[in-house]
Amino acid sequence: ASFTHQFDTPVYKGSASIDTRLFIDGKFVDPVEGGSIEVVNPTNGKIITSVAAGTSKDVDIAVQAARKAYKTSWGLRVPGKARGQILNKIADLIEKHGDELAALECLNTGKIYTFTHFRDIPIAVETFRYYAGWADKIHGQTIETDENKLAYTRHEPYGVVAQIVPWNFPLVCLAAKVAPALATGNVIVFKPSEVTPLTALKFASFLNEAGVPPGVVNVINGYGHTVGQAFSSHPQIEKLAFTGSTLTGRKILEASARTNLKDVTLELGGKSPNIIFDDCDLEQAVKWSTMGIFFNMGQVCIAGSRIFVQEGVYERFVGAFQAAAKGFGQAAGDPFAPQSQHGPQVSKSHFERIMSYIDSGKQEGATVLAGGQQHGDTGYYIEPTLFTDVTPEMKIAREEIFGPVAVIIKFKDEAEVIEMANDTSYGLACGVFTENTSRALRVIHALEAGSAFVNCYSTIEVSVPFGGHKQSGIGKESGEAALATYTQVKAVHVNI
Ligand code: NAD
């Protein structure tokens, strides 16, 4: 079972092929019960191919293969340096096949090829190289408790780690999860989103060549209620790392609580405030805020979707932002066209969900200053949309839309905006635009969020920790923090 696609586009000419089965114990295999998932091209709604869908039976086979690999060919028995070399080889292979990976990613998600090729692929490569460097630098402490006693700590892998990712940055999310888990000596069962299964299968095809022993990384495509549910309730999975919606995160935590109390890391949704003060550099504020909400068709967890603008700069900001939003809309088109900046939403159901939020904003009395409807009549394109006259109680100001929909709310002073910005159950990110450094830090320190941006927005660095406060998550990814996410500390007491 394989899929080959011939790309003849202005930005990429060539073919891309994958094995569409499950990748378990170092081999592509058919699922035990033979299910499949249709993969759709969001620019036109047509079926691209279908891939195998696993069930709990395949999950169990993969977990047993992973356990065997952990005991025989991975874990701390493989020196950190050797694990690091393998991670570097994975990075080399992602880099070598970068064009093909970017093309598959865009075909499946509708993401813009140039952004994917020049941003997502390099981030994935850098992530593997970054954690390759950490693999031989994972140290414990020695603690001398008294004259005759010594204690030391070991940072041990969990063993079998399950990882579940969403569809908005399939390959970047894969790298952020797989690289630190491997660097720290864990073995992995991995589930891509059922909406975007293609690039994880391409990635799986590199693993043997990179020298990853069979069973160490297993890729099991499937639905959340089957494969995802089997991960979260499997008694031999010791750790689960999830990125996706808050609703699903809650189900995973419940399943863990009901079964083996596996450790759970959750990277969830957001409704992040982006605050524009009177004394900002207006041009910069408009530029970053536009990308902050419209990049990747608004399908970004940290999107600055609630834009608070101070009275004195309100008219000018709204005018410039409206023009920028319309400009973004004019750059909507085929993800493989070099001039395109805005593609379709990932799926029909997601398109419909966003359109229903747009309708709700109109019904609740907000004013549409840009967009507000489907773009064209083919595929799942939505015009970059701007709502003003929004009040904090409106649904569009409270719920995560995860689409190209910005809401602007006017404010008077610092105290008022901090209050409004924190009035949400989410706490993923926040942004502040001001030329007054003291104010920037004062406000950022008062905002309840895991990532904060000052005079920029959505800059993500592989070396910096990432993770939400409040109901946006539990635990951290990225940077050195991910080493703690994928290890458990053993304290050893020695009587000398
Ligand atoms: P989702 O929660 O519907 O699905 C995410 C993944 O969970 C998919 O692989 C899905 O198959 C799986 N899943 C669904 N039900 C499950 C269950 N019962 N048990 C186990 N797994 C299950 O989210 P989505 O629609 O794919 O992605 C959008 C959401 O992801 C948004 O809320 C967004 O904010 C969030 N997100 C967060 C981050 C972050 O780092 N914080 C990054 C990207 C996306």
Image (cartoon, helix red, strand yellow):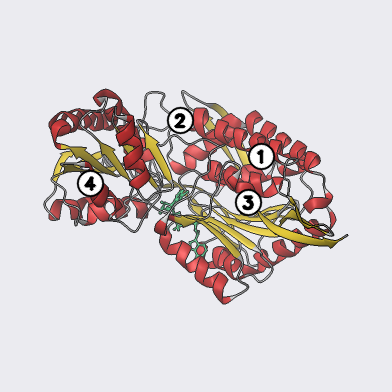
Residue 353 on image: x %, y %: 31, 55
CB of mark 3 near ligand 1 (< 8 Å): no
Single out the mark in the foreground, 4 or 3: 4
Instruction: Point out residue 56 in the picture as x, y percentages from the top left corner.
Output: 62, 68
Given this view, does label 4 or label 1 mark the residue nearer the observer?
4
Estimate how packed mark 4 is, as few (under 14), some (14 to 19) or many (20 or more) residues with alpha carbons within 10 Å. Answer: few
Camera-near label (2 vs 1) is: 1
Amino acid type of disc 1?
Tyr
Q: Which residue was labeled with disc 1?
A: 131
Is any atom of residue 294 visible in this view?
no
- Cα–Cα span, label 4 and label 2: 38 Å
Asked if disc 2 and disc 1 are in contact, CB closer than 8 Å, the reply is no
Earlier along the polypeptide chain: callout 3 or callout 2? 2
Label 2 sits on what residue type? Phe
Depth check: 424 or 126 in front?
424
Q: Is 484 on the left-hand or right-hand side of 224?
A: right
Q: Is residue 399 left or right of residue 187?
A: left
Specify which label sits upstream in the sequence, 4 or 2.
2
Please report whichever mark, 4 or 1, sits nearer to the chain's N-terminal start.
1
SS for callout 1: helix
From this view, report whether residue 479 is shown above or below residue 59: above
Residue 415 badge: 4
Q: Amino acid at mark 4?
A: Ala
